[in-house]
Amino acid sequence: MADKDGLKVAKDYHIDEDFGNQKAFHVKGCNNLDWGMKKHLSNIFDPKSGNTVMFAFDHGYFMGSTAGLERLDLVVPKLFPAVDVLMGTRGAIRSCIPPNCGKSIALRVSSGSSMLNDDLSHEVIAVDMEDSIRMNADCVAVQTFIGADGQLSSIDNLSRTINAANRYSVPVLGVVAVGKDMERTDRFFKLATRIIAEMGASIIKTYYCDNFEEVVAACPVPIVVAGGKKLPEEEALTLAYRSIQGGAKGLDMGRNIFQSEHSLEMAFAIRKIVHEGFTDKEALEFYKDSIGGR
Ligand code: 5RP
């Protein structure tokens, strides 16, 4: 293993150069994968826009019922027209989502924390590959805590899931966890996204940051951006716009949709940015018009 002495800081990201191995398949870094993987990835990333709108409602796996998700059975189906992918736990999906929803599934498979403990970085793999396949998951999501106390175990969770998923051509979504002590800097996100991609994840979920283009350029597979805590709609739309402009291939928003007063209209506004090239200003106008200027 290369030692840490004399490490030179990476700086040449060639952000204006397209990805070298894109070839015919529309998902970055996945051209060499087999048919089954490509089918799952095509269910997630629209072949026309190349992007995705994921709706995240897996918060309950460690937060219990959170504001806006008190009734999964009522909240989630309402959003079906505006989103491409449902990101949830097997319990939420099996109990509250009709199987004829026609949506792609990103299945949360790591677990082990709760809001009652300080250190959330020690998780296990709670859902095995057999049940993920039963759920017809288009990808399985594993939280990865780079730099935290649970780093080794979370990378072990990620790697073992990728090993099992590869046997059945199921993509893995590596989720960059930002623990309480972690810095939301491009330096951290470049490290975390690259480690997860090098472990073999096909999709990375992370957060927007300064120099985001460099984070994207250094990551050989597609990045989707988590929304994070609830923002005013205008700011959330700007976050979505900057993420897409910076090279993200989609958004995986939860609170900025389900905690919005007009969650369906907000999801449609995000969709305009992700799939129709709207700017944040145009999407905000669309949102305001769709709620009658209220
Ligand atoms: C919760 C998650 C969520 O999927 C992710 O954070 C996106 O949700 P939000 O936009 O509310 O942050 O990983 O543990």
Image (cartoon, rainbow, N blue to C red):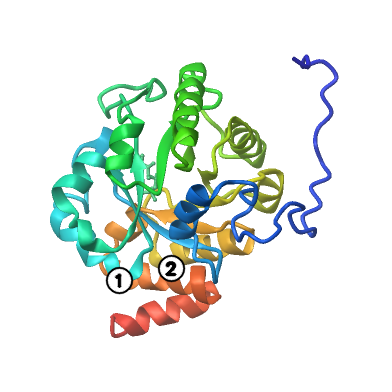
Left or right relative to 50: residue 246: right
Residue 157 in the image: above or below residue 176: above
Closer to us: 95 or 193:
95
* Picture disc at residue 81: 1
Q: Position of residue 145 (x, y in %)?
A: 49, 27
Residue for point 66% across, 44% down: 219
* Mark 1 or mark 2, whichever is nearer to me: 1
Q: Is residue 31 above or below residue 123?
A: below
- Identify the residue at the far front of this view: 35
Is 250 located above or below residue 196 in the figure? below
* Quadrant of image for the C terminus: bottom left
**Position in image of residue 66 (x %, y %):** 22, 45
Among the 4 quarters of the image, the one containing residue 107 = top left
Q: On the rendering, which quadrant does ligand 1 occupy?
A: top left
Q: Amino acid at mark 1?
A: Pro
Taking the image as shown, residue 4 lies to the left or right of residue 86, namely right
Q: Nearer the viewer, residue 221 or 74?
A: 221
Q: Is mark 2 within 8 Å of ligand 1?
A: no
Q: In the image, what residue occupies the spot 28% across and 58% down?
A: 258
Place residue 270 in its image quadrant: bottom left
Q: Which residue is mark 2?
A: 270
Q: Nearer the viewer, residue 149 or 17?
A: 17
Q: Is residue 162 visible?
A: yes
Whole-angstrom CA distance, mark 1 to mark 2, is: 12 Å
First in sequence: mark 1 vs mark 2: 1
